[in-house]
Image (cartoon, rainbow, N blue to C red):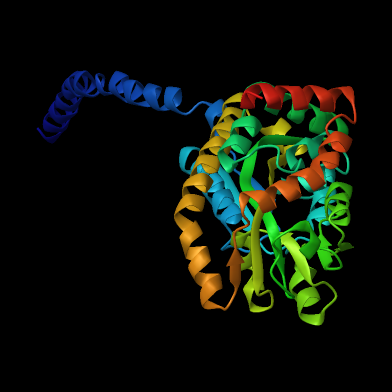
Amino acid sequence: MKRFIALALVLALFALLPACASQTAPAEPADQAAEEPVQDAAPAEPTEEAEEIRITYGLSQSEAHLGSQASIYFADYITERDPSIQFDIYFDSQLGDEATMLQSLMTGSIDMMGVSFSTLSASVPEMNIMSLPFFFGSPENFCKVMRDETFFNMCSGLIDESMGIHPVGVLGVFVRSIANTEHTVRTPEDVEGLKIRVMANQLYVDVFETLGASTVTLAFPEVFSGLQQGVVQGEDTGLETMVSNRYYEVEKYYSEVDYLYTGGYECCSDQLWNKLSDDQKALFIEAANAANDYFMSLRDEAYQGYVDTVTEAGVEIYSPTEEELTLFRDALQPIIEKYAFVSDDSTELYNIACEVLGY
């Protein structure tokens, strides 16, 4: 009897097996269906494209300077739209003075920097077009020329070919006037005999020697101490630089001669530029134009604040009359004739600028 019962139980278990199989079989396709979309959603290529690019970015100016603020805007604009690109920004010449950083950029030791037209002109003399005295007439005109597509592409090609770095856009626009520790400057005669700090660019040397000054080339980080110690008695500068670097503590006379407008390019090393995808390159150029617009809006808003800051510190701001400015224009006309036509490329850039400005 017991054997009969055991046999019956075994037969009952075998009878249940088909039912169990019919219940679990549908689950296998469901599992496959769940797995297939996961495989499609995570192919290898997007993972590679999302690899982080970390950019070392050097600047000469303090973080408070408008040019630096525009560079921060540039970096944030890119990172917000492509989080795989991150920036480490170093202010106040932490990576070396401008000439030292430029050498690092050319070798790829750093990835980006703001390079002034004055510094670029040492290797690409055609960049002196940007520093012709009394040529552009206003900051807006200056930016209009710098951002003209034909003008920019020609400048970018000359710089890349000569230096192995790649400009992506204009780094601000700065007014150059005259500040000093000695007296009010109304006419070119008031510049005679002053020891003026200038950038290491022959055009700037020629400008102030034409006006009768003696010139001293000091690296940017040395300017404040140079003014304190009497190594120099003045400089060509703008209010934004005077405020952000506290030159108003030692210079008490500022004359709004506004004899030239200058700036620079946001430049990438070729190593970085070649690493970027086409979409990322387009984003860098878009960001540079947006940062230049941001700079111009900051400049307009900040100007009165600069005036208030320096006047409260005891600086006299003098605005020359039109007759006095004409004396400066006439005195500096030979500088245009000397630097506008140094090569066929320079002449072409000059003619493009004249066309953009309607001259």
Q: Looking at the picture, tell me which residue is in the foreground, 149 or 275.
A: 149
Image spot of residue 257 (x, y percent):
67, 54
- Is 132 rendered above or below residue 36? below
Residue in view at x 18 percent, y 27 percent: 13
Image spot of residue 12 (x, y percent):
14, 25
Q: Looking at the picture, tell me which residue is in the foreground, 299 or 73.
A: 299
Residue 279 is left or right of residue 131, and the answer is: left
Residue in view at x 85 percent, y 47 percent: 203
The reply to whether residue 198 is in sight is: yes
Q: Quadrant of residue 139?
A: top right
Q: Quadrant of residue 134?
A: top right
- Extreme residue toward the front, this view: 323
Q: Looking at the picture, tell me which residue is in the foreground, 81 or 292.
A: 292
- Is 290 rendered above or below residue 19? below
Q: Looking at the picture, tell me which residue is in the foreground, 264 or 266.
A: 264
Image spot of residue 345 (x, y percent):
84, 24
Residue in view at x 63 percent, y 57 percent: 320
The reply to whether residue 78 is in sight is: no
- Quadrant housing the N terminus: top left
Residue 264 is left or right of residue 43, and the answer is: right
